[in-house]
Amino acid sequence: MDPDTEVERILRQEREDDEDDEEEKKKHQRPPSSYGSMKSDSEEEEEEKECDEESGQAFFPPLPVVLPGSSTHGGTGLQMIRSESPETLYTMTTQQTKPPGAVVIETRSSDLGDLSESDEEDMDEVLVTHSPEPPEPVEFDEAMQTDENSQPGRLHPEQDLPHIFRSVQGVLSGLTPEELYKFKVWFYQWEPAITQQQVMDGDLLDFVDRIMEILGQDRALLHTISSLEQVNKKEEAEELKKKCKRALMRFQLKQYLIRKHQVIREGVVRAGRQNMLDTIYVQPHISTCGYGGIDPSHLFPQQPPSPVQVPSPDTYVDLNNLFRLQKPDGQPVRTVVTTGIPGIGMSVSVGKFALDWSELRANKDLQFIIKLSFRTFWYLRTKNPLPSKKPEMSVMEIIEYFHKECKDTTFLEEEDCKFLIIMDALDCYQAPLDWENAPVINDNHTPAHPDVLIVNIIRGTVLRGARVWVLGRRAAVSQIPPRFVDAVTEIQGFSDEMIDEYLTKRFDGDLPTKIIAHYKRVPMLRILARQPFVSWMVATVFERCFRYRGYGEHPPRLTPFYVSILIVQINRRLQFYYGKGENELKWSTDDKNLVTKMGKMALKMLERNKSVFVEDDLKEYGLKLTEVAVYSGVVTELPAASADGRRTFCFIHYTVQEFIAAVYVFTLFRLENRNVLDSGLLQMPKIFTSKDQTKSAAGLVQCALERTLSAPLGQYDMFLRFLCGMLSPDCHHNQMSGCLFSRNSPKVSGLDEAQRLLEQTIQNAEESNRDRVENLKECLREMIQEDE
């Protein structure tokens, strides 16, 4: 039915009602809302005087009755208890506002004859009344906020329920009865969560009270504005928008963050296989004392001794408390830098932080959260999509371009406006930043080059009220001068218990138990899975494998996981830093050379018993610092400089260095038929039949065995295992085809001889090298075990 027709029908029906029906209606009418009447105190006093003059001595007003056991609270001194008033989450808060000694009026009882006049006089002295206003918000699920640093924080008054309630109430009270009916009809017709009876019953305050409870304050506000516009009350709608602009801006930013981060996109997104971030998220350890984020754990005594320290648990901080940290002088931090090794989960942590803010679970005192990724700035620098097409732009132009809801607002320019700018992926901004000589900008509307804007945002000369969260790989964030940073945090990864929790959250039934038991059969995989990226890989690979009947009889092989790590990181390099699409991830000659050159350096470091290198080492092998330390995804910078002050770097785990070295040796063996391990003095066993023995698969394994068995335990043992693993056709012919090797390359031959060599070495080692036996057996399994 048309809303105007229905309004006319309702009004016509009301005019035809007789006085008896109206009396009956009044009898059941809801008392004034717990929020109080919309009339002013003076109007109420005039009505009371008129009523007293008409009734004279024939009517005695009800006297206050003190209810036994009533609790007292600070706030108003008059508490109304109405049996006919449907209590809601919001109206109930008014019953928590009675100060000590105040009186409660019981309107459910009409038996007041037992009170004497002296009792009445005594109780008149303690009656306290205030103007009827919506109550201050009460946190039902959390303790009252007494400390500004405690979570979840308090909303800004203009973003909280009382202000929105008053604003909606004030605008709607200006409508005539006919306009209000028309508005209500439209409101319930286009809002499926609310019924006609809920909209029409009661007075205006009942209506506002009810929509706030059923729809929530954001949805109720938006639907009120929309309904006003639809019934041609655009001036009232604009007035409500103006009154609640801060709340509306927060809502729009919140919706953007929810859309962006509610679903976590891991690897290649598969239709129908999306995971909700809240469902599977496990918070990794985050430390305020960063040592590089490298896990020094290893299967063998570390060779060389690890240069990396591990932060103690007392330095760990909760993700949502990063901006509750304080500077040494006790002032709250403004700029926080978070770093970690590649694959440690920085992007996911940003998503969880933003989602918790959007859902009002934490950091409610931040009025707004605005994402300005360094990818955004790089896009502006290279594409310049702004309408003006000017080479320079102001920070407000950038914010308004990417967040339309921030247009024509002045909130962000207020120094007391507490909001957060998230600037993640600093490593994606490929231009150098001049921290010393960049011009100083003091105005948010001054156009400047993106390089200059970034420096001034982190300096704090623009967006003065903003907290700034900068994230990136350590080799990228280390360029920021320490004087501009208030706190540095480092994501350390998972503990063993966190890995199990993550896998349990991802799957239902008995699959998590199977996966957890299976990956723990390989101790090195258990260590590596402390990186969230590897935990995801464990979950993805084993979920697929356990679909096959009989899978799980043998322990998983280790080498395929390291091959997958290398391939994924190089593909991410192509996507993030070179703008390649998912269908364009073909490795170029430069990409292959990057891997082999890093492998050559890694092998030389193994030979020298080193795990740390400097920039000069990269130049020796024709490598660029940024390509290796930032883009490769397998190298990170260490926070401690060398003794001569030079920047130091290492692989993201010592086993990754051993693996990359094995990749180099195997690549030259397969592509160039070269055995770089051959010293020319090697005496080959009689089991070999090949004329050019050292260039066969068995000859390659023999050279690696000679190095391993003659070196201290642990120096080459994992290197040998990875080399044997890559001899498996599943690795070099299936996994690595299309990346390092062309798809039509033949399989490596002569594996039978290599297998006999390993079996013979194991038999000899059981007598002379017992500490090597287990690793040699693993080498054999890596080479001959077929995927189930």
Image: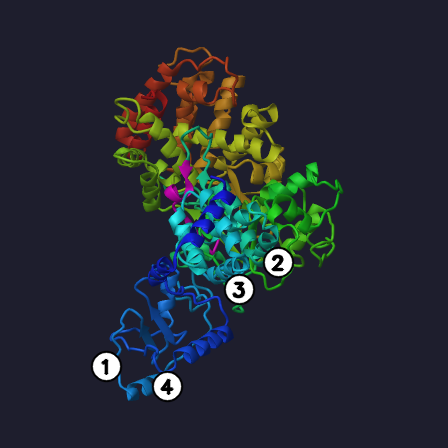
Which residues are the magenta region? 275-291
**Distance of label 4 from label 3 (alpha carbons):** 47 Å
Q: Secondary structure at mark 2?
A: helix
**Distance of label 1 from label 2 (alpha carbons):** 58 Å
Residue 552 sits in which quadrant? Answer: top left
Amino acid at the residue labelled 1: Asp
Q: Is residue 351 left or right of residue 574?
A: left
Q: Nearer the viewer, residue 177 or 553?
A: 177
Q: Nearer the viewer, residue 642 or 448?
A: 448
Q: Secondary structure at mark 4?
A: loop
Q: Secondary structure at mark 1?
A: loop
Amino acid at the residue labelled 3: Pro
- The tag on residue 125 is 4
Amino acid at the residue labelled 4: Glu
Q: Residues within 10 Å of mark 1 (few under 14, many from 20)?
A: few
Q: Earlier in the sequence, mark 1 or mark 2?
A: 1
Which quadrant does the C terminus fall into?
A: top left
- Residue at 40% x, 65% y is 32
Q: Is residue 685 magenta?
A: no
Is residue 771 positioned above or below 212 on the image? above
Report if residue 556 is visible in the image. yes
Identify the residue under disc 1. Answer: 114
- Residue at 54% x, 67% y is 331
Identify the residue under disc 2. Answer: 411
Q: Is residue 646 left or right of residue 447?
A: left
Identify the residue under disc 3. Answer: 332
